[in-house]
Amino acid sequence: MISTLLVWIYIFLLTTLTGHFVFRILGRLLRKDVSAEPSTTEMSITGLTFLGIFLSFFSLFLKIGLAANLLIVVFCLIYFLSARKSIISDFKSRVIGFKQFPSIVKILIFIYLILVLIAAQSIPNVSDTGLYHIQNIKWISNFKVIPGLGNLHGRFAYNNHSFLLEALFNFSFLKPDFFHLLNSYLLVILSVTLITLVHKKLSHDIWRGFLYAGLLLLLQIFFLKSASSPTPDIFLLAGIWFIFIIYLERITGERNNKLYWIPVLFMAFFMVTVKLSAFPIALIAVLFLAEYDNSWWRKLFLILIVVALVFVPYFIRNYILSGYLIYPYPSLNIFNPDWKIPVQYVSEMKSVISAHAQSGDWQQRPFSKWFPFWYSHLSTGFKIISCYIVISPAVMAVIIFLSEKMRKRFTSDLKIVSICFLAVVFWFISAPNFRFIYAFLFFYLLLTSMIFTIFILKKFLSLGYLRSYIDKVKNLLPKAIFVLLLLFSVWFILKLDYKGFEDSMVFPARFKDVPYNRVDLNNFIVNIPEDGTYCWNLPLPSSIIQKHIGITDIEMRGPDLKYGFRVIMK
């Protein structure tokens, strides 16, 4: 636990100072648009995004280890010394602002901090973490981008850019069984943001307060158990929720602060490099084109600059890892380096992703066969959610058509709802595993439910004898919500598994130890787990012998691992 707090503080300092630098530069460029200072969490998530973009270039030339940390620390130290008066002043103002929160808000923040801290100590339990997450991060920490790494293991070619940041903060150069604490840090800052928003909104916008309280509960229910894993799902969720929150509260909120558009654009496009399934979040750029009061060509030029800075290193890394600009999409079959993953393997990998999400196995089926199987194997809750997703657009269209007031009041919310619905459609067509769509789905469910409820209540409020009862309930709800959040968080603390917790007082739990065999594979030796599936923290190079994922007929391209791998052509 002690090391977890120290790593969190380290991440906080580097990301917040970087974010402070970004906002300071933007403030000078867009002086006329500055109307409010970003919160500490907004600076941190912005700094994290820009550090990720920097590392995507850095990883093309060097491993992300000690040198990367030193370079960023030196930059942050120089910036702090040059702008210390402004930074210290901002910090003092934020401390004063925190002190002004009522005791119940401070207690809730403290409880959530403890809750995530305890969860972060557990052994990572996400299956994909053992399958490829840890191994991918180890390659990034030990080598610059490896040509043909996807030939060793198909999923090593997944170019998840959150792993670049995981490699930066894992301190593998100090601790072989490295840290995996970035996601728990993100859960902390996202929880703090939601708690403070619940407090601010319940006093004058109770429905938006309900929205953020609901998100906080869902965050706890679905993601707390994964806090100790370096899964991209949590990184993606935090990024997308921050984008939506900043859009609703800053860009189109009461103060209409357009300073935030540029960080949001960078954040949105960076999320696509974390997971391709996040592609619909890039539609936020359409809102930028429609809403930002500048010439259309200047806005388009700015978007192209952001796209270039984010995607050029992403495409280069894809090309080096797999031989394709986007993996696993064999239709973009442009280049033919000797390390290129054969097209048939890429096609198979692409089909595996959708087939496994549809039917739970590797076999491709037509819609008429996989859909009944998929729906029948959903839990009751997700069956209800699926029906709601189908029906809700029609209901929403009726409400918008019937009520001009609702249409005007929820203009910004409806835009977010539209993006989320398009994301759900994209998800259903590509890989309908609910785990892949939580970030968009939860926002969609809560926003649409909020709009439906308000519409119904307004109809009832036209009946005068109900108004007094509803007003009484609304006055009691803010306190009730905070009591509920407190009880819920305490209940989660009590139900956490504390087995072996005493061994994690200094360091988080180690990764799972798995037995393995050293196999002589052509001109190199590879470590194969005995279960044939999960490598976890095995020494490099490790892979699996498994149909659809592991490719075994390969060789090293040179005398050392840094030269990469290629398929032996017969």
Image (tube, helix red, strand yellow):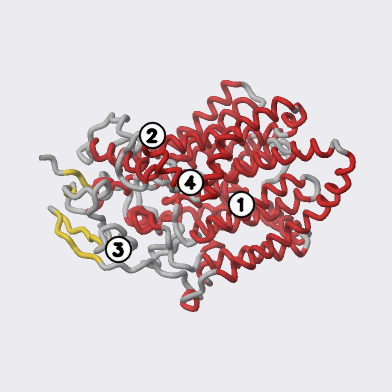
Mark whose residue sits in front, 2 or 1: 2
Residue 449 falls left or right of residue 383: right
Q: N-terminal of the two: label 1 or label 3?
A: 1
Residue marked by disc 3: 538
Residue marked by disc 4: 434
Q: Amino acid at mark 2?
A: Phe
Tell me, yes or no, whether the two marked residues, 1 and 3, touch with CB atoms within 8 Å.
Answer: no
Between 33 and 539, the one nearer to me in the picture: 539
Rounded to the nearest angstrom, the CA distance separating label 3 from label 2 is 39 Å
Rounded to the nearest angstrom, the CA distance separating label 3 from label 4 is 30 Å
Residue 204 falls left or right of residue 356: right
Rounded to the nearest angstrom, the CA distance separating label 1 from label 3 is 44 Å
Q: N-terminal of the two: label 3 or label 4?
A: 4
Q: N-terminal of the two: label 2 or label 1?
A: 1
Tell me, yes or no, whether the two marked residues, 2 and 1, touch with CB atoms within 8 Å.
Answer: no
Residue marked by disc 1: 82
Q: Amino acid at mark 4?
A: Phe
State the image coordinates of residue 125 (x, y, percent, origin top left).
42, 62
State the image coordinates of residue 334 (x, y, percent, origin top left).
28, 29
Q: Amino acid at mark 3?
A: Leu
- The quadrant in which the C terminus is found is top left
Q: Residue at x 48, y 50 (%)?
A: 233
Query: Is 452 situated above or below 160?
Result: above
Q: N-terminal of the two: label 4 or label 2?
A: 2
Tell me, yes or no, whether the two marked residues, 4 and 2, touch with CB atoms within 8 Å.
Answer: no
Is residue 563 visible from the viewing direction of this image? no
Q: N-terminal of the two: label 4 or label 1?
A: 1
Q: Residues within 10 Å of mark 1 (few under 14, many from 20)?
A: few
Q: Residue at x 21, y 58 (%)?
A: 526
Rounded to the nearest angstrom, the CA distance separating label 4 from label 2 is 17 Å
Residue marked by disc 2: 367
